[in-house]
Amino acid sequence: MKKTLPSQSAAAAAERVAREDLVLFINACFASTGQSEFYGDSAGQGVSIRFLHEYILGNYRRLYARTLAAGVNHFNQMLIVRNLLAAGAPKEPAQRLEEGQLILAALLGLPPQRAYHLLRELRAARINNRRSRGVVRLFLARRPDLAFDAVKYRAHVRAAAAHTHLKLPAEVAEFVFVGSKRRAAFQTPLFESFRRAHYSAEAIYELPYTIAAGLARRHKLPSDEFLRRIAPRMTANERLRLLGTAAREGVKEVAFDLGRAALTKLCLYLLSLPVDEKRERRAELEAALGSAAERSLRRTPVALGRVAVVLDRSFSSSGSEEKRRRPLGVALGVSALLQRAARECRTFWTAALPEHDGRPDELLVTPRGQTGLAAPLLSALEWNPELVVIVSDGYENDPPGAVAEVVRMFRRYFDREHRISIVHANPVFDSDRYMPRVLGESLPTIGLRDAEDLLTMLGFARFADGSAPLAELESYLAARMPQLLRRLGRSAAAPEVAAEAEAEHEGQ
Amino acid sequence: MKGSDKVQTLSLRGLEPAAPQQLGAVRLVPLLRSQVGGDLRLSLRRYKDAFGVVALDGEPDGRRLNPGLKYMGYVPHGLVMSWSDDGSPITAFGTQMMADSDGDTKQLGRGGPVTARLLHRMVKRESGNRLRFLPLHLAMEGYLSLHFGGPDIAWSEYSRQALREGLDPRYETVAFGRDINRLDAALRTFEIHEGQCGMLLCVADALASAFVVPHPDDYRILHHSLIEDFYGDLIYQYSYQYRDLPRLAPYDEGPDSQRPKTLAELRVLFEKSRRSWADVGHLLTSGLVGRSVTSERVYRAGPFSLQRFVTSLRLDDENHIGETIVREDGTVEYLKTYRLSSGQAKRAFLLQTLAQHNWNLDAAAASQNQTRSALMGRLVNAGFGYLIAEHVLRAARRHR
């Protein structure tokens, strides 16, 4: 037996620990949102994921920042940005520049309500170092329409400006700090509409929906009339959310082209419909699901061969109060996506679905029954696929541990060369284990928040099963950084942030 | 065994345990029924008042209590059983449009923060083929009324109260399901199997209760009523004592002992190992299934008979009481058990020993290889001191 030097083996062990930590962290960042799950409450989830963030920030700061580029979910991007800003700028100029760019790019990439929420959190957490002030200034300067933001997120903009002592453009400052109490008219039309809307019911229809909804209550407007006239001001998500209300009120103006919704959002909407309505509108809903899947496929074009999907529709896929039917929605989305991404695709649900046109009727899927994944997995393997994707929360109970055993024996007796890849995608974060629950050692598990991320995540699966070394993971993250930084713009961004970083350094 | 006969040994005939689901110290084992009759259905009837008074012999009269034997306790719900005599399938009561569901009860008093409900008998026929009974309370009443009359022969050692009124008033304390640590979460997250007709509820691998209903649809409705039931003290203590349980799996000679040549063979191996999970259920019920029981038939309904039972009392083992509905061919259609705490088992055992020896203290003590004063000490510790005359007890204490 060849002896390795102690220092060598220690380095190897350190490398393994670092790799496992990072894979654990990135996996958690894909799945966790700090909300309650079927098996765990939100308090436990929040404590668990916040601890994980602090641990990784303390030990692997550079990689922690680069995780922003890995495509992790918004909740975790916010947490990373917040923790980095709280930790202050690093000493080394190159790292400081990189971090600054990543933070700003991530902040600009977040949905505005989340980005503004983060700015407000800085005040609550009393984070007010030089870099965070710079980030707030640059972020507000780069918003496409600050006047609109000032109306829609007025309290947030005010909090950010007051906290960082930021000089806003003259009328914006007047608007966020004085607002409707101002006697004289504003020059900016939107500000003026907001001021007038406090006195005239007509003016509220020029405002964004969320602001108008609050004022409509003050003017005691009938809800059907209000919905009819505010419809043009709604965002896509607001329309999707209010489809049911509009139908109840008999308002036809709140229409929404379902095919334009994000895949997982659409799946959750479909699952929320009553069975009879799903049957009646079958053609429309199936077409919408198809076009949503096509669209997310165009964004990440991947061609797959023969794919079998094992999908968990057990009772636990009903999610929680906060994430209603989310695991089932993700499963439905993955099925729709892979049926279009793969040359051939077949789905195997844990409990058989009713048939429609000779195929399982996925539109009518409901969360029901126990989690028996091994039987559908065996059916999937008998079909002889190239790739098997299992979507499940990992709480296997009929019987426990059967998938790991089936995969192990399958590899041992039928597939020694690993011709068939088997991947487990888990939409649920297990707070006790700091990661999505695994089905066993014999197959990799990846966290999955949205079905449309699946194709990206398949690339990450080789890190999850521990076959790729740390250096490869680092280069994977580094390679994804330019994609994120593209948001900063090609010419102007880099020098600007660099100058900002330099200025910070001088100030210290 | 015929349906008209009393149950002599307890079995789970017609039911097969599946793999357990566990949360914290609570392990829940689903019981699956392969053949569902459909001619017997159970449904739940909720009572809004927390406190129930069951008139065991007298007719309830208006809003007043008549003299007579009463059973009082926390009665959150009753069960309504409907059956057909010719074996044709029926729907569960409650899925049909029927009259007022509180028809068999009366509210006592004129409202207020705590109201009580007066119920007429533990088991009451409501119409042709419909019977209302109070689950667990039926068994508990059977347990409490064991030798309730007191000494048959007026031995001079017994107190005047014991001779005049027997054991009255006799009471026991239990733990509510809501007080059992994490039982609510375990029941909420439990994934009900297709075709599931029952459940073994274990805390720290001690069998707390076995619950069986005739039809899977009834089970889905009655599943959440388990949180409203009551359980033994031991179960309550265990639920706080243990945070987690070791993994429990059936013995496996190793899947590699047989080498599968095709995927179909692998599936056969998998199905075999899946069925072997029933062993875990059998292991957990080893203190209940196969035990000889003393049973009493409460009602006969067509091919079914409703019985209540007590397992043979053993001080070094688990003891259960419960009620069951068995079909003529011995299939268990309904079962609900309660695990007696050690104190409760001890009390029943002492009463049984005394009754076997015609309440003769000397004979009973001799059967236990004890002195008379030691037996009296045990009676006092068990809470039966009031049965013995004061001067006899004093003398016994001196001689100990």
Image (cartoon, coloured by chain):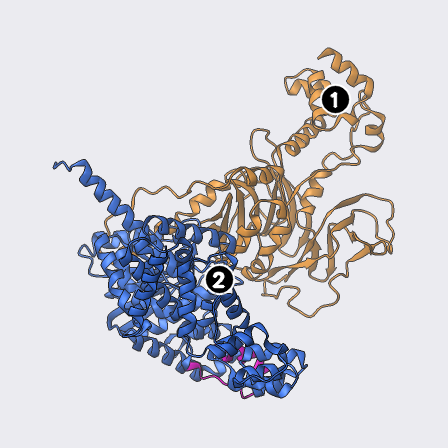
B21 lies above or below B396: below
A289 lies above or below B79: below
Asked whether the residues under the numbered discs 1 and 2 touch, taking CB atoms below 8 Å apart as contact, a structural biologist would say no
Amino acid on which disc 1 is placed: Asn
Answer whether residue A245 is magenta in the image. yes
B141 lies above or below A424: above
Dot 2: few (<14), some (14–19), or many (≥20) neighbours within 10 Å? many
Q: Chain of mark 2?
A: A
Q: Which element type, helix, strand or loop, lies under badge 2? A: loop
- Residue B360 — which label? 1
Q: Which element type, helix, strand or loop, lies under badge 1? A: loop
Q: Foreground residue, B136 or A177?
A: A177
For the stretch drawn in magenta, the main secondary structure is: helix
Image coords of residue A258 (percent x, y): 44, 81
* Chain coloured blue: A
Residue tagged 2 = A319
Q: Is residue A354 visible?
A: no
Marks 1 and 2, how far apart at CA: 63 Å
- Residue A374 — which label? none
Amino acid on which disc 2 is placed: Gly
Q: Foreground residue, B70 or A35?
A: A35
Image coords of residue B386 (percent x, y): 79, 27
- The residue under the point 68% across, 19% down is B365
Q: Foreground residue, B310 or A47?
A: A47
Q: Chain of mark 1?
A: B
The picture's colour for chain B is orange
Q: Which residues are magenta?
A: A237-259
In the shown orientation, is residue A158 left or right of residue A469?
A: right
Image coords of residue A386 (percent x, y): 23, 65
